Image: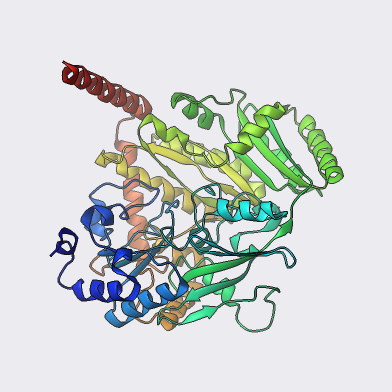
Amino acid sequence: MSAEEENVSKAMAPVVSKLQDAIGRENVKTSKMERLLYSHDLAPLPNIAQIAFKNIPDVVVRPHTTEDVAKIVKIAAEEKVPITPRGASTWGLGGSTPVFGGILIDMSGGMNQIVKVDKENLFIKAQAGCTWKQVMEAALENGMMLGAHPSSFPSATLGGWISVNGVGMGTMKYGTSGDMIRNMEVVMPDGTVVETGYDLIVDNETGYNLNRLIVGAEGTLAHICTVTFKLEPAPEVMRALTYAFPTLKEAGKPLMDILRSRIRPLHIGYSDPNHFELLRKAGKHAIEDGAVLNIELEGDKEVVAWEEKKIDEIMAKYNAKRLSDEVAAHEWDERCYEYRCREVGIGSIPGEVVVPANKFEETVDACYNLLKELKMTGAIIGSVVDRNTVMFMPYYLFNPDDLPQMTAFGFNTKLANYSMTVGGRPLGFGAFFASNLDPIRGTGAKYIRDIKKVIDPDDIMNPGKLTGTTLRYGIKIPPALFNLGMGAMGMVKRMIPTKDIVAEAQEAYAQERALKERDGRHKSH
């Protein structure tokens, strides 16, 4: 018996054997080290999380085709083994990490090919493990453009962002990830392969829209294998603009003026002064002019010039400072590096909520009040989703190895609850915030769970996510108890003495570096 086979539990041994026969031994991984790599996502979690969730999969598989995925799912259905789909895990709510172990399907390892680029019919088809960067570049090489993409586009995969119906760069003009999809090839919980739409035309016929059913389902209904996107002709020009304000709150009124005009930017993002201060502490060159609005325009040269002129007029009305074209281009290039502050040596966790645009200034105050109340170090970044929706992504720093610091998670619940009081809502459920389904959807939550039960009666497709918080032994956490627990974490956080967490991390890093240098000198002697 090989060392890798020794890591397989007796219960899973028959499943592993079937998987090896189905897709090849080289595509089935069971070593403990390899499985540990898949036990977390973007958010750093302490080892104590293993008490609540079995985050380590029992086996990792790497399919290369839709047929491979169908074989894997059929085996899981026969054996009643849970499946967790995974791309690059650039999300932070536990959506791509197991709750009950089982089979983890790594899409980025094998299903990452562009299938077809059709210039005549303006579409591109790609496997779900492709990165958004791959698809964007393939489209541009052929004179076309993918409308929107996540800020994590260099590494984020198609299936992941589609599964959360993500909003990001370009969403303001071209819609969410789901708005760009013509068709998907998915594997249902019984192993059946289904096409959800059409490659060439819009799916607006009567009947339930299968594209919309799968998009945003967080992998709980089907496994996405290939995606067909509609494309746009490539723009004649792209133009980056950056405007500075003393405070983020002061950007609210000019932002509303833009949203109530005929100007239609590709993207509007914003960052507060705290964000740039944390970047400087991480050793990065950053803006020192306060808060900023970053605006990206694209299209025909004349249209972009008109939009730029109108935006300049709005900004002048509110005494905004226009920064140089070089700074604006740099900010656009940096759009996928929102959390460089982690380089001081600690973790950061984002909160994500959407609120009505006219609540921008109020929400800025709410975020700062929460950071102050919970004695946290953090900043506010975000973007515009559409003409009446703004996404806030305040983030905070914490040390995942310091157990008391874990109480900082109460921030996300408080922020989510606040957003709902102003007509907004939090974004995403995953494993950690699945109990939010009831307060967000109200009586509709029952029908969402009913759909899940009908399509996936054995609950093998990414279980423990979206439809309710369930712990590793099948213990369900009702929404009231979840909110009570998160509220208690917030109370504990207020009682913990304030720490300069950045200074602590920098000191620890300096000490570690000094020790390494000392050890290096000793070895040289």
x, y percent for residue 357? 66, 49
Q: Which of 441 and 197 is in front in this view?
A: 197
x, y percent for residue 138? 62, 55
Q: Is residue 350 left or right of residue 116?
A: left
Q: In this view, does 517 lie above or below 113?
A: above
Q: Is residue 470 among what the camera can see?
A: no
Q: In this view, does 214 lie above or below 7?
A: below
x, y percent for residue 147? 67, 55
Could you tell me which residue is drawn at 36 percent across and 62 percent down?
480
Q: Quadrant of residue 320?
A: top right
Q: Which of 238 and 95 is in front in this view?
A: 238
x, y percent for residue 235? 76, 49
Q: Which of 317 and 513 is in front in this view?
A: 513
Q: Which colour scheme is used?
A: rainbow
Q: Is residue 228 among what the camera can see?
A: yes
Could you tell me which residue is drawn at 35 percent across and 35 percent down?
346
Could you tell me which residue is drawn at 79 percent across and 34 percent down?
312
Q: In which quarter of the image is the C terminus?
A: top left
Q: Is residue 41 left or right of residue 168?
A: left
Q: In this view, does 363 lie above or below 423?
A: above
Q: Which residue lies furthest to the left in this view?
A: 1
Q: Quadrant of the N terminus?
A: bottom left
Count of number-bearing discs: 0
Q: In this view, does 253 lie to the left or right of 12?
A: right
